[in-house]
Image (cartoon, rainbow, N blue to C red):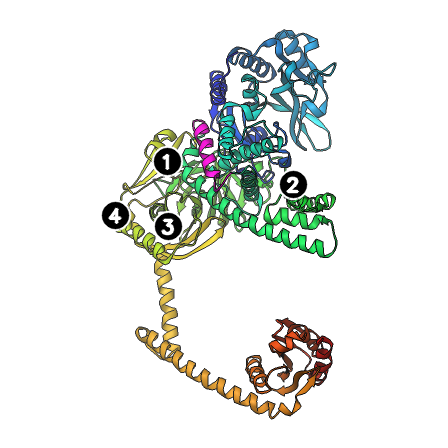
């Protein structure tokens, strides 16, 4: 058998099913679309759910993919064995109501035996024990003896996910030989050892589960095949594990080279080598799909993977930053199958480097926290770190339990593992309860799911803002209806429309729909599943019915201003790349008629100079008057032009390329101006951070900018009026007022100090001596906290050191200050501890340093008691 490489096997599989009439689709993003039930795509069929449920019509009834997937459910086991991995590629062939069991079984056997060349006598099929149909196909048609076909129960060979489509499975196992076996008598298919490995799983989706265990036969039966590419490569290359497959081994070897370690020499090294190898693959692919490290959701998963990789690199002895170096190996070995890796290379390296730097700082902080915890344990004669503290280190500072245990073990301490697990479970329960309950599709059910799946809407709005068409469907907010009448809120679907539906950050059009019988105000335009466009709004006159001829009229002013802002975002992105660097990628946007918002990847706040440069660059291109040209072409042709694509975006074979002169070329489905002159002008209003490594620019153009200037002018005029000045002289007027206020404030402070001194009178006669320390405790009226501090300093100086306690009552409240000099402190005085006791007597609380403390209270009536208590409290402190 020829030992094909992983990249070869991927191509062989897709080519084989393309020859069987399948449409080969590129891998979907790891970020699920319209599916709240998944954090990350974890199976080949996950992105295709709408086709299986019938909510969307597939591009073809036969589809084949190689889908990138992430599974992190058993992340703690990664590295400990060579079986587990977080990132994997899932090969799949799918039928949506087309072929069924016979073809699926025949083709799986043909591919494995004739294309890949696996020995037929080492392959063993399994079927669901009640699936006689599949058994007969294997036995009677494929000629597999009955004793070589294994029947398994529901747990192993029946696929279902709560309510929804489900069905029996038929798997194919490969016998890797006795060298991979457990050696026990009777070892066969189903044994837990590594000899018999499942390499193919045909899922026959033929039933509907109502959620209560009741099954009905589906009208449309589907095929969902899954086969792990890495696992197939392990078998074909006859290697021990996925970490020995050609492309992954190249990465593993690079890890070993950087660490100066040999694989399979020492178990603890092997664990770390596997963790780094696996996690950097996952992180590289996740970042290429636009996922950024954060403290929640999929961003937290990414951060955890990066930090585990960084930490295990340290354990292996790798010096300095190394993750981007390893990522380069990932990209090099996988870019043929996933060109987005090469396209986003600069960004991937930047994210990894920034996150690795952050972790290096965090781990140092964590080590300091752990050192404090060690001191606390010593002080309390404890030999074990609490589970709560161990979990704090894990959750906040990225210290896995084994790292904490390893550090503490060297110093003779243990860790409460049970307590750690309890704290972990509490967090998991919180996460589970926070997760939305969803239907099978993972999206909240809406009235639109009741619409005829075959309906579609043709968008004609690039070239015209008015068109005639036919109403094909109507809904209220709750049901599909045949008519809407005056005052009804609802949604209209038509055969074609000039209205742009919200997409790619651009809001949908507004306008009106007119029929012979009525008029409908469109307040929002949205995309619905299955290629339909919904016009959401209210009937303002008459009645509108399904089948009515309708004239669609887009609000031209709203569209024009929205298009100006959208075109400006293209110029902005190019300008940001020019000023900040090629690592800048769009991370989200919002464009309407009033403003534009643009999120982008960058790791620090922009300087005033950088903002000015970007603004000037955009305005230069606007003034130049660049023609905006839109062309439709294949994705490959578009990439040859250098057109920028969005992170994680799924593009079809035909894409729209928007060029603004030679300055900006992007893939975009939005609406734009015909020449940049139309944008008029561009102004950045704000630049801020919205997430780790993501910045946001808010900006205005044209009409929105003129409105902003008008509002600013009104504010300026009002300010000038209040200052009794003209706008042109306002700055000088404000400076003069500021100088006047400054002088008045100085005079005011002098007066307050004079009044405070007068209020206290001759109090030095009240000084007493407590165990050799002078104490002055007194009560004054109407002195604020600032004046109290000054007064305390003066009195302490006049009395030649000691302790000063002053209680002031003013406006129904009390303020307290305590001061102590170094000599008093050396004898045991502590201002902060004194004030805690004194403040209680005036209904308050406070604290501070040994030499100075202050507090406030709500009970001024207790002032006398507070002053009298000072002597007793100080007496208790002094040695």
Residue 125 drawn at (x, y percent) = 64, 15
| Residue at which label 3 appears | 565
Which of pointers 4 and 1 lies earlier in the amino acid sequence?
4
| Closer mark to the observer between disc 2 and disc 4 | 2
Q: CA distance from mark 2 to mark 3?
A: 52 Å
Quadrant position of the C terminus in the picture:
bottom right
Which of pointers 1 and 3 lies earlier in the amino acid sequence?
3
Say what secondary structure mark 1 lies in.
Answer: strand
Q: CA distance from mark 1 to mark 2?
A: 51 Å
Residue 677 drawn at (x, y percent) = 27, 50
* Of the pair 330 and 830, the residue shown nearer to us: 830
Locate residue 349: give its quadrant: top left
Pointer 2 and pointer 4: residues touching (CB < 8 Å)? no
Which of pointers 2 and 4 lies earlier in the amino acid sequence?
2
Pointer 3 and pointer 4: residues touching (CB < 8 Å)? no
| Residue at which label 1 appears | 656
Res 552 seen here: yes
Residue in the picture at 63% in, 6% down? 143
Locate residue 669: give its quadrant: top left
Read off the magenta span: 318-337
């Amino acid at each position: 058998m020829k030992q094909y490489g992983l990249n070869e096997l991927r191509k062989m599989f897709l080519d084989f099913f393309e020859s069987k009439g399948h449409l080969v689709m590129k891998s979907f993003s790891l970020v699920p679309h319209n599916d709240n039930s998944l954090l990350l795509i974890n199976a080949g069929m996950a992105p295709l759910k709408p086709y299986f449920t019938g909510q969307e019509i597939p591009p073809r009834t036969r589809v084949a993919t190689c889908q990138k997937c992430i599974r992190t459910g058993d992340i703690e086991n990664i590295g400990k064995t060579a079986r587990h991995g977080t990132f994997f590629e899932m090969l799949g062939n799918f039928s949506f109501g087309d072929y069924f069991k016979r073809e699926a079984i025949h083709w799986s056997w043909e591919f494995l035996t004739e294309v890949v060349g696996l020995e037929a006598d080492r392959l063993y099929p399994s079927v669901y024990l009640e699936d006689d149909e599949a058994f007969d196909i294997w036995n009677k048609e494929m000629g597999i003896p009955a004793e070589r076909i294994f029947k398994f129960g529901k747990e192993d060979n029946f696929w279902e996910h709560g309510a929804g489509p489900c069905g029996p499975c038929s798997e194919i196992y490969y016998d890797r030989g006795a060298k991979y076996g457990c050696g026990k008598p009777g070892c066969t298919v189903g044994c837990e050892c590594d000899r018999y490995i499942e390499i193919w799983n045909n899922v026959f989706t033929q039933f509907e589960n109502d959620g209560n265990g009741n099954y009905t036969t589906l009208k449309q039966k589907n095929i969902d095949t899954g086969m792990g590419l890495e696992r197939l490569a392990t078998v074909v290359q006859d290697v021990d594990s996925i970490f020995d497959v050609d492309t992954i081994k190249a990465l593993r070897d690079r890890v070993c080279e950087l660490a100066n370690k040999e694989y399979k020499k020492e178990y603890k090294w092997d664990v770390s080598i596997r963790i780094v190898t696996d996690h950097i693959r996952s992180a590289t692919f996740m970042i290429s799909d636009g996922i950024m490290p954060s403290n929640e959701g999929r961003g937290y998963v990414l951060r955890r993977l990066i930090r585990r990789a960084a930490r295990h690199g340290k354990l292996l002895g790798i010096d300095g930053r190394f993750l981007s170096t390893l990522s380069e190996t990932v990209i090099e070995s996988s870019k043929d199958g996933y060109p987005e890796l090469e396209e986003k290379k600069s960004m991937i390296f930047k994210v990894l480097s920034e996150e690795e730097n952050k972790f290096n700082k965090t781990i140092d902080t964590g080590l300091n926290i752990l050192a404090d915890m060690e001191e606390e344990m010593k002080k309390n004669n404890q030999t074990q770190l609490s589970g709560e503290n161990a979990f704090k280190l894990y959750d906040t500072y990225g210290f896995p339990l084994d790292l904490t245990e390893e550090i503490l073990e060297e110093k003779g301490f243990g860790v409460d593992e049970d307590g750690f697990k309890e704290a972990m479970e509490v967090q998991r329960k919180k996460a589970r309860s926070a997760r939305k309950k969803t239907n099978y599709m993972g999206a909240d059910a809406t009235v639109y799911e009741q619409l005829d799946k075959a309906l579609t809407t043709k968008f004609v709005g690039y070239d015209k803002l008015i068109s005639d068409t036919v109403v094909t469907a109507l809904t209220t907010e709750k049901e599909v209806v045949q008519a809407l009448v005056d005052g009804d809120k609802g949604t209209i679907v038509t055969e074609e429309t000039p209205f742009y539906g919200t997409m790619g950050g651009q809001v949908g059009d507004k306008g009106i729909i007119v029929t012979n019988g009525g008029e409908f105000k469109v307040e929002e335009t949205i995309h619905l599943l299955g290629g339909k466009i919904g016009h959401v709004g209210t009937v303002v006159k008459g009645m509108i019915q399904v089948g009515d001829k309708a004239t669609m009229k887009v609000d031209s002013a709203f569209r024009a201003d929205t298009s100006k802002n959208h075109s400006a975002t293209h110029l902005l992105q190019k300008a940001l790349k020019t000023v900040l660097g090629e690592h800048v990628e769009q991370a989200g946007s919002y464009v309407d008629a009033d403003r534009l918002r643009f999120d982008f990847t960058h790791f620090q706040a922009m300087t005033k100079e950088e903002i000015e440069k970007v603004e000037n660059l955009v305005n230069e291109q606007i003034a130049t008057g660049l023609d905006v040209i839109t062309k439709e072409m294949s994705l490959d042709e578009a990439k040859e032009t250098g057109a920028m694509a969005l992170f994680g975006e799924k593009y079809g074979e035909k894409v729209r390329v928007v060029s603004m002169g030679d300055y900006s070329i992007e893939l975009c489905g939005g609406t734009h101006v015909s020449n940049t002159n139309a944008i008029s002008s561009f102004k950045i209003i704000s630049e801020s951070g919205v997430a780790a490594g993501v910045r946001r620019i808010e900006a205005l153009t044209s009409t929105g900018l003129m409105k902003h200037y008008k509002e600013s002018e009104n504010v300026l005029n009002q300010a000038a009026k209040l200052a009794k000045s003209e706008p042109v002289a306002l700055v000088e007027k404000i400076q003069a007022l500021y100088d006047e206020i400054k002088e008045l404030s100085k005079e005011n402070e002098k007066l307050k100090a004079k009044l405070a001194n007068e209020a206290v009178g001759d109090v030095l006669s009240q000084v007493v001596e407590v165990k050799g320390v002078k104490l002055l405790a007194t009560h004054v009226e109407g002195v604020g906290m600032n004046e109290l501090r000054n007064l305390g300093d003066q009195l302490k100086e006049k009395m030649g050191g000691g302790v000063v306690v002053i209680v002031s009552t003013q406006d129904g409240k009390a303020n307290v200050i305590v001061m102590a000099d170094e000599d008093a402190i050396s004898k045991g005085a502590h201002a902060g501890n004194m004030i805690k006791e004194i403040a209680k007597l005036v209904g308050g609380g406070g604290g501070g340093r040994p030499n100075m403390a202050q507090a406030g209270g709500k009970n001024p009536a207790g002032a006398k008691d507070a002053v009298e208590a000072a002597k007793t409290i100080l007496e208790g402190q002094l040695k």
